[in-house]
């Protein structure tokens, strides 16, 4: 059983509508935003690491093509 | 038991488990939360004293509950970090602190908006509200400290100590409504008694709490995965994962 007679009554909530709907709006905005932001972060990390790997493998291929060149590779940590 | 504990410490194992769990957490969480919220908004009876403004409870209690519960989980993880030096425990603390901060903010915000028609004021410096505000600042402190120290080991230790110092605030929040005079009403759910609300009110509330819990679980898995990718980027399995696009 619905607690309200009409859609208008549901929205108005006997004068408490603005308070209730503000809360629900902000809640879904923030929780949804948090979820979207977290998905994006993982995707961005994946993408930048993929780019890094591709750059590394091109660099390695370039070095192997010139066996005469020899130098010590420094691994920055 | 010990084998499980060791496995739990392995980022690769955790990443795989998280990937398998996440769809269930997400779907279950959204379904339960929406069921609780729709039931609470449209079908639960009106409160005889507060009228319809009480419908804010169906998001206020879940956010406030999670805000404290996340901090307690962070404290447990902090002990694990200090005693067993488990890196995943430290990663958990860092990954969920922003989630805790957002949920604490939402608990304060929905509480303030609920307070206006019910108590006649947005804010009052009483024990429950002030201790929740301190919780928000503790989350900010953890986030800032976690980002401030570059060395992984000292950062992990410093963050864990701060989390443990702040845990003293949790019982203060919990018992503030009993120790001091406050406008805030006492807890809705108690472990030892049946809720004083009718079932048409507390069942949707329970659904919303469980739903938000599952969504938190999903967020924790996702955010820890991101942290693992960053920390373990030199390992072969992460590079393999990145090349195959995460599958």
Image (tube, rainbow, N blue to C red):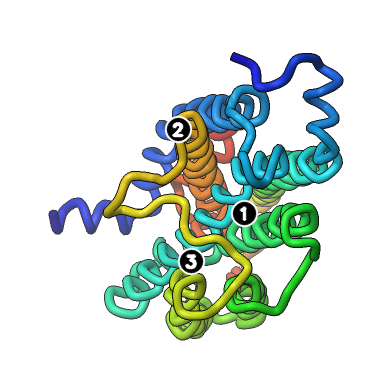
Q: Are marks 1 and 2 on the same chain?
A: no
Q: Are marks 3 and 1 on the same chain?
A: no
Which residue carries the number 3 mark?
Answer: B71
Q: At which x and y percent is residue B197?
A: 46, 41
Q: Are marks 3 and 1 in contact (CB under 8 Å)?
A: no
User: How far, Cα to Cα, is label 3 from label 2?
Assistant: 25 Å
User: How far, Cα to Cα, is label 3 from label 1?
Assistant: 56 Å
Question: Does the image show residue A46?
Answer: no
Dot label at residue B203: 2
Which residue carries the number 1 mark?
Answer: A67
Outermost residue to the left? B1
User: How far, Cα to Cα, is label 1 from label 2?
Assistant: 72 Å
Q: At which x and y percent is residue B210?
A: 46, 39
Up/down of B113 relative to A73, above or below = above
Q: At which x and y percent is residue B135?
A: 59, 73
Taking depth in this image into account, of B240 and B199 the one nearest to the observer is B199
From the viewer's perspective, is the residue at label 1 or at label 2 nearer? 2
Chain name for mark 2: B
Q: Are marks 1 and 2 in contact (CB under 8 Å)?
A: no
């Amino acid at each position: 059983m619905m607690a309200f007679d009409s859609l208008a009554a549901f929205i108005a909530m006997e004068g408490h509508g603005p308070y209730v709907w503000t809360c629900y709006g902000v809640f879904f905005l923030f929780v949804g935003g948090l979820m979207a932001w977290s998905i994006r972060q993982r995707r961005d990390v994946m993408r930048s690491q993929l780019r890094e790997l591709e750059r590394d493998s091109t660099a390695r291929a370039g070095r192997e093509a010139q066996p005469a060149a020899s130098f010590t590779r420094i691994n920055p940590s | 038991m010990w084998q499980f504990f060791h496995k739990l410490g392995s980022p690769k194992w955790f990443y795989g488990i998280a990937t398998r769990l996440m769809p269930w957490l997400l779907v279950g969480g959204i379904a339960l939360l929406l069921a609780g919220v729709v039931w609470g908004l449209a079908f639960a009876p009106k409160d005889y004293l507060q009228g319809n403004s009480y419908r804010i409870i169906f998001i206020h209690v879940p956010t406030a509950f999670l805000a404290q519960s996340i901090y307690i989980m962070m404290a447990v993880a902090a002990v694990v970090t200090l005693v067993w030096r488990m890196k995943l425990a430290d990663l958990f603390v860092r990954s969920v602190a922003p989630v805790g901060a957002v949920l604490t903010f939402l608990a304060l915000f929905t509480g303030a908006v609920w307070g206006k028609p019910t108590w006649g004021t947005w804010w009052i410096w009483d024990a429950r509200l002030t201790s929740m505000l301190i919780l928000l600042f503790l989350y900010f402190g953890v986030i800032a400290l976690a980002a401030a120290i570059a060395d992984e080991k000292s950062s992990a230790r410093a963050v864990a100590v701060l989390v443990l110092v702040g845990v003293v605030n949790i019982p203060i929040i919990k018992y503030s409504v009993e120790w001091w005079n406050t406008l805030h009403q006492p807890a809705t759910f108690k472990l030892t008694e049946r809720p004083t609300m009718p079932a048409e009110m507390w069942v949707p509330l329970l659904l919303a709490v469980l739903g938000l819990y599952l969504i938190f679980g999903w967020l924790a898995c996702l955010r820890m995965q991101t942290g693992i990718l960053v920390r373990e980027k030199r390992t072969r399995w992460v590079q393999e994962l990145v090349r195959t696009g995460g599958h």
